[in-house]
Image (cartoon, rainbow, N blue to C red):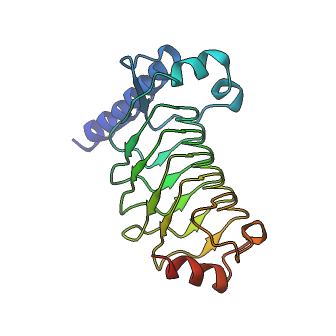
Amino acid sequence: MADTLVAMRWLDRKWQKVVEKKLIEFEVEPFGEIIVHGGNDISYKEADSAARKERMKQVTKVVFLLNIIKIGKWACLNASILVVVDIPEGITRIATSSFASCSSLKEIKFPKSLTSIGVNSFYDCSSLEEVDLLHTKVQDIGGWAFRSCRSLRTMKVPDSLQTLGGCVFKYCFKLVPSAINVSDYRDATSKVVTYLRSIQ
């Protein structure tokens, strides 16, 4: 019986990899949707290709497959008409440039399970007005994560936050008072963290 269970688990993992591989190879998503799955780290060359850019212009919905724990690099880069993203529970990490240049993105629902936001994750999401991480377990926010989010007015962070990368809020003119030099942000010094908490 034990051998049978081991074999079933192996087949299940193997099948999941096959499905993910086919999704990547053939992009069988419905029109207007992008599927985010466990193997969705793509190269920048692919993400920046003319074909990919053209396809991402049509994306209005992000579909997350079950049991994934991260959103991979450049997963939704340049999804310029995407407005709302509801990230499901279980996801702990948003990787590099996952939602960069989603210029129409206005609302992001973050899961409680989230612990890390990567470099450039929401770079140039120019319509984003609020980021609420209070209910999450976020410990680090990578450099440039919200750079050039020019409409960002509210940033709520949890007590679990420990580190901030460089220039996280550079060019977020509506978020940071002119007295704060955002270009000087490096690590999560107590001064920066205290400031972020003060604007909740």
Q: Residue furthest left?
A: 1
Q: Is residue 158 above or below residue 47?
A: below
- Quadrant of the image for the N terminus? top left
Q: Nearer the viewer, residue 49 or 79?
A: 79
- Quadrant of the image for the C terminus? bottom left
User: Which residue is found at the position 35% from the left and 44% from the top?
Assistant: 67
Left or right placement of residue 59 versus residue 164 in this view: left
Residue 106: image x %, image y %?
A: 43, 47
Count of marks, rendered view = 0
Q: Residue furthest right?
A: 184
Residue 138: image x %, image y %?
A: 49, 67
Locate residue 15: give its quadrant: top left
Q: Nearer the viewer, residue 22 or 103?
A: 103
Left or right placement of residue 77 versus residue 90 in this view: right
Q: Nearer the viewer, residue 63 or 124?
A: 124
Locate residue 168: give its quadrant: bottom right
User: Which residue is found at the position 63% from the left and 28% from the top?
Assistant: 47
User: Which residue is found at the position 27% from the left and 40% from the top?
Assistant: 5
Q: Is residue 138 above or below residue 117?
A: below
Residue 156: image x %, image y %?
A: 46, 70
User: Which residue is found at the position 58% from the left and 35% from the top?
Assistant: 77
Residue 83: image x %, image y %?
A: 41, 39
